[in-house]
Image (tube, rainbow, N blue to C red):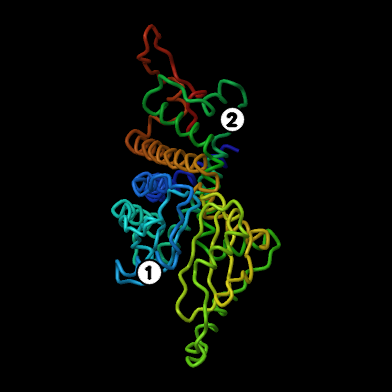
Amino acid sequence: MMKIRRMIFWIHLTSGCLTGAVILFLSVTGCILAFEKQIIAWQERGYRSATPDAQASSLPLDRLVAIANSATGKRPSAAIVRADARAPTEIDFGRDQRLFLNRYTGAVLGGGAIRTRLFFDTVTGLHRWFGASPKNRPASRAVQGTVDLMLLLLIISGGILWLPGRFHWQTLRTGIFLRPGLVGRAREWNQHRVVGLWLVFPIAVITMTGAIMAFGWATNLLFFVTSSPLPEPARTATITQHRSRPISELKQPVSFVNMQQVVDSAERQAVGWRILRIAVPDHEDRTMTVSIDFLDNGRPDQTVEMVADRRTGAILKSNTFSSHSLGSKLRLFTRSIHTGSAGGLAGQTAVGITSLGCCLLVWTGLSMFMRRLHRPEMLTRRTLRSETVKVQAQGTPERSIGSADIQLE
């Protein structure tokens, strides 16, 4: 039994040393990204207008899009309308540029928190692809996915090592509660065990969702476990077929309703909506897509995608969360669970705390490894049983730290 435990210890130690730097990097960047949405919203709070009069009405979306087009000379790709009457209308020009307009006057308010968004975009690129260029991103995602799997191995081996040799309160408390007054290896060992215990579940969830996003086989495994059919690439085929229609057919004069009529139709069918994301269609597009968010947190079960006919303004179909298979539902939830947005502010806080905890786990683990390299003779059980530390608390006498406090192999 001791030989098996020692082997698991060396697996845990080796895996931690090989991946510790990458795990620390992902934890730091993940912690920075935890409250991205709230930070950007706080910086852009100045774009909100005063409470409008009861008789005030918003300008048509077509007019706002035209104003943004004239101001930038670029064709908008999407528009975001919020249910809050004081919120501006956001016109996006791809991912890197946006413009905020007063929804009642059409006044151009500005481009938002440009530097802050650029900072978070950079950190996101570092977190997801280690800052690699698009052609190298598959390789970087594979590296990140491998680290996720190694982290799962650390979780499993660490859980086995956490179990004490003898189950009694004196040994269990060293792995459940932080003990003030410890110094050196004793403090690091106590922190490593306690933080690892309390964060084992959220770390496992974040790790597994990261692996699903990194590897196609992990996604396929998810569909296999849930007995769900694999999604068919029908969407891409449909778009390709649409774009490959004869030019003569595309240039045929067709009378389209304006975008505001489509938005009004979507609003009537989406009672209680919070955000509308409208994909600005091309001139020849005969359909228009409106994504509706009912909670403003990106949860897939609280979003609906409506496709409207631009010739009549009628809603052709609504893609709801309930229409997906179990595997598709879990896959849709993967990203929001990984970022914590599925749980709102509480979920984001949990992810932030977990990321900080991972930083502490890496620090204490590598520190204990360096101590082992520096003074290996001090890490035997016999020496640890006789080692003493002085506690610098008022009136606290010197006491000894035994195997109940530290259990290393």
Residue 361 shows in this picture: yes
Residue found 46% across the figure and 55% down from its top: 57
Vertical order, 184 against 308 (above or below): above
Residue 165 numbered tag: 2
Residue at the limit of the structure toward the front, as seen here: 55
Question: Would you identify the image quadrant in which residue 60 lies?
Answer: bottom left
Residue annotated with mark 1? 66
Q: Nearer the viewer, residue 302 or 125?
A: 302
Element assignment for label 1: helix
Q: Marks 1 and 2: CB-CB under 8 Å?
A: no
Q: Nearer the viewer, residue 310 or 395?
A: 310
What is the quadrant of the N terminus in the image? top right
Q: Nearer the viewer, residue 331 or 264?
A: 264
Residue at the limit of the structure toward the right, as seen here: 227
Vertical order, 342 against 168 (above or below): below
Residue type marked 2 = Gly
Image position, residue 304 (x, y; %): 59, 60
Vertical order, 49 against 399 (above or below): below
Residue type marked 1 = Ala
Image position, residue 219 (x, y; %): 58, 62
